[in-house]
Image (cartoon, grey):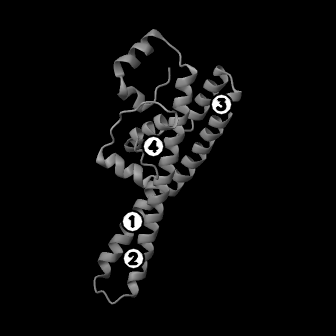
Amino acid sequence: MILKRNQCLKNPDQNLNQIKRGNTMNRHNIIFDINYSYYLEEMFSTLTGRIHKLISVILFILGGSVFTPFSNLLLFGAFVSCLSAIQYFYEYAKHSCFSNIQAKRYLALIYNESTLSDDELHQKFNELQKSDTQCYGLLANAAYKRTSIKLGLDDHTKLTRLESIFAWFAGDLPKA
């Protein structure tokens, strides 16, 4: 049985019992997990893309500051150096691109879900999961909430202030 991080947190005793009994996932669980994975990848792609663009704009502004009459060019140079290192080592643009591609794969599976048998759907989902990106845990509850809303399920997940900020910056702050 495949469980996403957030599902394990919702009801760990029930999930543990299902794992011990060896129950397989039913179609509804697979569809939920596919949608959850799609929203998580989509939010992560948007978030990392926006971080990359924000750092690029700040670097552009700081780069232009060498032409200003400020006397503390060392400070501007230090900021440029730090931001460049962050952008280089964390590779936000690359993560955004990979996550966007993965989200599109999940979206294609969502669209084709009705034409696939349970076993085919499960197999394709397992194959897609092998290419998942490591998304920030702060987006997990927001993606869970968005999936529940989309599928018309009851959800009483409360987002923390930090999760709400990250979800908003990732382009999707679910309210319901």
**Mark 1 or mark 3: whose residue is earlier in sequence:** 1
Pointers 1 and 2 in contact (CB under 8 A)? Answer: yes
Q: Residue at x 56, y 29 (%)?
A: 31
Q: How far apart, in angstroms, are the residues tagged by discs 1 and 4?
A: 21 Å
Q: Residue at x 42, y 78 (%)?
A: 63
Q: Secondary structure at mark 3?
A: helix
Residue 113's disc is 3
Residue 118 figure quarter: top right
Q: Secondary structure at mark 2?
A: helix
Pointers 1 and 4 in contact (CB under 8 A)? Answer: no
Task: Kindly identify which residue carries mark 2.
Answer: 62
The local crowd at label 4, few if under 14, some if 14 to 19, many if 20 or more residues have their Cα within 10 Å, is some
Q: How far apart, in angstroms, are the residues tagged by discs 3 and 2?
A: 48 Å
Give x and y (percent) for residue 146: 46, 40
Pointers 4 and 2 in contact (CB under 8 A)? Answer: no
Q: Nearer the viewer, residue 50 or 130?
A: 50
Query: Residue reaching furthest top?
Result: 21
Q: Residue at x 65, y 30 (%)?
A: 113
- Above/below status of 23 relative to 70: above
- Above/below status of 29 relative to 98: above
- Above/below status of 5 relative to 55: above
Q: How far apart, in angstroms, are the residues tagged by discs 1 and 3?
A: 43 Å
Task: Kindly identify which residue carries mark 4.
Answer: 135
Q: Which amino acid type is marked by label 3?
A: Glu
Q: Mark 3 vs mark 2: give the one in front.
A: 3
Q: Secondary structure at mark 1?
A: helix
Residue 157 figure quarter: top left
Residue 108 figure quarter: top right
Q: Nearer the viewer, residue 25 or 87?
A: 25
Q: Residue at x 60, y 34 (%)?
A: 128
Residue 13's disc is none
Residue 83's disc is 1
